[in-house]
Amino acid sequence: MLSNRVFAGFLLLSTSALAQAPQGDRAELRALQAAVTAAQSAGDNAWMLISAALVLMMTGPGLALFYCGLVRKKNVLGTMMQSFAMMAWITLLWAVCGYSLVFATGNPVLGDLRYLFLRGVGAAPNAIYAPTIPHQTFMVYQLMFAIITPALIAGAFAERVRFGAMLLFSTLWAFLVYFPVAHMVWGDGGFLNAFLGGKYPVFDFAGGTVVHITSGFSALVFALYIGKRAGYPHEKMAPHNLVLSFIGACMLWVGWFGFNAGSALAASPLATSAFVATHFAAAAGAVAWMAAERIRNGKASALGAISGAVAGLATVTQGAGFVQPFSAILIGLIAGSLCYLMVSVVKERFRYDDSLDVFGVHGVGGFVGCLLTGVFATRAVNSALKLANGQPAALGWIDGNPAQVLNQLIGSGIGIALAVVGTLVALKITSLVTPLRMSDSEEANGMDLSLHGEEGYNFEG
Amino acid sequence: MIKIEAIIQTSKLDSAREALKNIGIDGLTVSEVRGHGRQKGHKEVYRGREYQVDLLPKLKLEMVTPSARKDEVVRTLVEAVRTGAIGDGKIFVSEVEEAIRIRDDTRGEAAL
């Protein structure tokens, strides 16, 4: 806050002084102004580059470890490969046209192609989104979100989908679901963009709708479409190495600071606020899930604790930069207990094989987090939305704007609809081109041998 | 010669080795095995999904000794690994026809 004031003071001094200063002083003031701008840019850029790296670390190794520990050991490499392949493949899509389709100004659903092949995306900031950092930093930061989203879906179809089919599906899915939803929520002129002229203003700070609702609901559709793993649910399919999952979950927790606090797009007090909300929700989610397990099974498990933290993180993502610390704790507590119920009671009842609970944690958490953001968002935390008179606008229900819950509902509804339809279309097209599912014998032998010709654990020799 | 195979609780390896060393049994092969006798398995719960685990991890000790030492070795082992609970394991004794030391082709009890 203080540094901002000093900065603003400098600017005020320099701009007002510029008008009447004599020639020599004017040049000096211009130089001072440039130095101040460069200093802020250096601070913001350092934080945003670190944030981008943190978000990439969430996919690899964070998510890769989290998921691979939950499958059987014959599928450990195949599962890690799904995350890693997204790091490589989505990056290329993003460079060619993905970034442009999401962040170029276009129509309310999709960006145009002005940034095709990253043309014009360089060191000069993009004033619309992040005026203090190089446009290229913004581009590469947003890429990391596009990587983790399809990687999350892979948990629903774990242990039974062919590698090539997974790549083709993820490509189609990026075009049909991720790019449009991300543009609608975050892109300039997007249909749901609360800050840049959306028809239905949705608050999605770091991707509750863009990342978690889309991946969670797509995951459910995919799991239902492809069917259960051979032997599910009567055969034992216990996690083969929860130690790996544990390490992965801790990396997700830390990486999430880049995901949520980085979404402030500057090293600002808002980033701090989002950082705190993120951490508190993760902690509350872990506590709630452990308590629920203790009550229902008599034991709080390690897998439960880390699942609860991830549920809290996924659920607070949407509101991270809009809610106060104790709202975040409440969001985390709701997330931990509700996602526990979804995963251990509702899934058991309906017997669908969302193998690693992408829907139960990210879909449900994302949806609930979207609505709770409408309740708890407050201008005390985020004053970016201005009224005509320049005062910060009321954000959520607690600010006296209950209608925002409806906006959030519309936003998540559109996200869900597009996820369901887009996933079905992508699955249909993929299965016309190549078989989605491994053969029975391939599935029995495991992904590592059948799809990649190697094994995760060779302890002999 | 006889071969003594003992399937024991995994936590009892050190006391078994110590006891065997004290009576001069130096050669020993240990493998990790899984199995069940009358002991019931246990329940594991992952995200609310329960699995009954029936095959429990055990250790199998194998040693070959002169036939005359059978009672002594068996008694020592039993005393070293018994807890008195179900799941303590079993000992099997069988005849061995021949023993060969690979390094120098020594045969019989001298090879042990």
Image: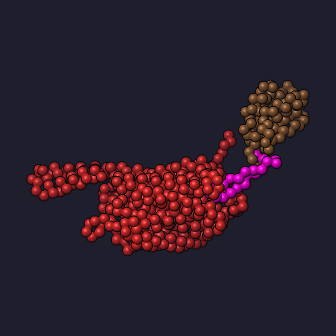
User: Is residue B38 on the magenta stretch?
Assistant: yes
Residue at screen point 17% across, 54% down: A13
Residue A317 percent location from the top left of the image: 45, 60
Q: Looking at the image, which residue sits at the far front? A: A295
Query: Is A326 left or right of A343, judged from the image as shown?
Result: left
Q: Is A8 or A334 nearer to us in this picture? A: A334
Tell me: A282 left or right of A104.
right
Q: Residue at x 78, y 29 (%)?
A: B19
Residue B22 on the magenta segment: no
Using residue B1 as the reference point, say whether residue B81 is left or right of it. Answer: left
Callout count:
0
Q: Which quadrant holds residue A378?
A: bottom left
- Which residue in the rendered view is the most extreme toward the left? A22
The residue drawn where x is 40% and y is 71% is A402
Task: Relative to B27, say whether A70 is above or below.
Answer: below
Percent x, y of residue A374: 42, 67
Q: Is residue B70 left or right of residue A307?
A: right
According to the colouring, which chain is brown? Answer: B
Q: Quadrant of the C terminus of chain A?
A: top right
The residue at the point 75 percent across, 47 percent down is B56
Q: Is residue B66 visible?
A: no
| As drawn, B73 above or below A456 | above
Q: In the image, which lettered chain appears red?
A: A
- Magenta range is B34-54
Give the image location of residue A412, x and y in percent: 47, 70
Q: Position of residue A453 (x, y in %)?
A: 64, 53
Its colouring scheme is by chain
Depth check: A328 or A442 in front? A328
Residue A359: tell me if it is visible: yes
Can you tell which quarter of the image residue A128 is in?
A: bottom left
